[in-house]
Structure formats: structure tokens, C-alpha cells
Amino acid sequence: MGFEMEWKKVKRTGFIPAFLFGGVLAAAVPVLNMAVRSEVVLGIDAPPIQSLLNANWQMMAMLNVLLVVAEACLMYHTEYADNAMQRMCTLPMKESNLFFGKFAFMAVMCVVILIIENAAIAFCSFHWFGRTENILVELFQNLGYELLLMLPAVLCSLLIASVCINMWVSLGIGVVCVFMATMLPTDNFILSLFPFALPFQIFAGTAKDTVCHFIMAAWIEIVILTMIEVLFLKVRRLFE
């Protein structure tokens, strides 16, 4: 129900075109990078997928997280504009369903843009490196890993947007968080657990133990952020 409602809402905004354009823009990063300086990437002593991700994923991940922050602010701006949120609260439905509907919709859109980006990585691998074994398996593993690590950032962005009535405040907080994440060292496990820093991690070439630790951390953050949002909604309802 929540997913269908969000679909009807975003059809009246530029949400879907903006998300798709952001995914295409991020997908263009490895293609343009290989077209301009392919000799540098080809000189990296690593498997094709790992070489491409090492050379391009930091920029792609930053674009993805910025897109998530902006779209989360847009989704809640439509709720707070003209007191639409107050009218929604009078309906016989839980306010948390509104949040989870937005989360489900953004998760689906994240899958779409990650498919576009991994398709670009596959194209670069085939075009510049030639056909390699198990490339599709690696790409699917990479897609699933990237999606899971992006979900805490999605939840955190929606949480901030739900707290701040003014869209510019939530957007400013989100952008600051993204740029903080870009300054954190990706090889420091504790600092990398910051929700906006998790999407910068790469599956290819990472030790299995480290991958498992990040997967566990992502699930824990998803549960914690969900509990915080539900608690916040209950507390806010008491003071309305």
C-alpha cells in the first residue's frame, strides 16, 4: 500500500527522471575515464572488475549518495508542503507506513541505478579488458553488496528529512554528511561504519572477513535506524 502511494506521488514530481539521470551520470564515469586514460587503468595489476571499481567507484558512490540525499529531501518536501503531512496524520494509517513506503520506493530506485552502473562497468570490462570468466557472477555480487551498504544511507537520509520540515535544512545536513564521508579513510573499519561512508566500500578485492563484517554492520545499522525513526514518530505524535 505504501509503495503504491509513493509511486502515485512521485509521478507528479521529477523524482524518477532525476534518479535515472543521476544513475546514468554515475554510469558515465567509468566509460569516460577509460576513454580518456585507459592506459592507467589497464596498467593496474588486478582483475578487471577490481581495477575498474578502484579507479571509478569513489566518484560513482559519491554521486549515488548525493542523489539519495536530494531525493529523500524531495520526497518529504512534498509531504510538508501546504501542511500535507498534518492531513495525512488524520487518516486511519500509521505514520511509520509512510516512512517505510518511501524507503521501499527508494530501495527499488537504488536497484535500478546500480543495475545501470554495473552495466557500464561490464561494458568497460568487455570493451577494454576483453571477455573474462565469471564476470556476471562478480557483477551480481558487487550489485548486492553495494545495495546493502547503500540502504543505511537511504534510511539516514529519510530520517533526517522526516525530522526537518524545511527541505533546505535537511539537504544541508545531508550534503555535509556526504562530504564528511568522502574525507574518512575507507581502510578504517570503525570510521567506515558511518552510514554515508558505507557505500564507498568495494566488494571486489576485499577480504571475505571484511566483507562479512561490513554486511553485519549494515544490517545492524538498518535495524537501529528503523527503530530510531519509529521512536521519533511516536514521540512527535505525543507533542502534536
Image (cartoon, rainbow, N blue to C red):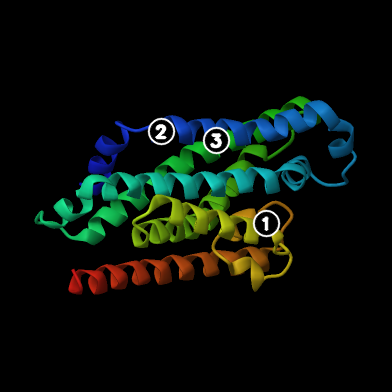
Q: Residues within 10 Å of mark 2 (few under 14, many from 20)?
A: some
Q: Secondary structure at mark 3?
A: helix
Residue assigned mark 2: 16
The residue closer to the viewer here, 231 or 90, is 90
- Whether tag 2 and tag 1 are in contact, CB under 8 A, the answer is no
State which tag comes first along the sequence, 1 or 3. 3
Could you tell me the amino acid type at mark 3? Gly
Picture coordinates of residue 112 (x, y %)?
47, 37
Count of marks overlaid on the render: 3
Picture coordinates of residue 158 (x, y %)?
40, 56
Q: Residues within 10 Å of mark 1 (few under 14, many from 20)?
A: some
Residue at the spot x=39%, y=32% of the render? 14
In the image, which is nearer the foreground, mark 1 or mark 3?
1
Could you tell me the amino acid type at mark 2? Ile
Residue assigned mark 3: 23
Picture coordinates of residue 134 (x, y %)?
67, 40
Residue assigned mark 1: 182
Residue at the spot x=54%, y=63% of the render? 195
Q: Quadrant of residue 222?
A: bottom left
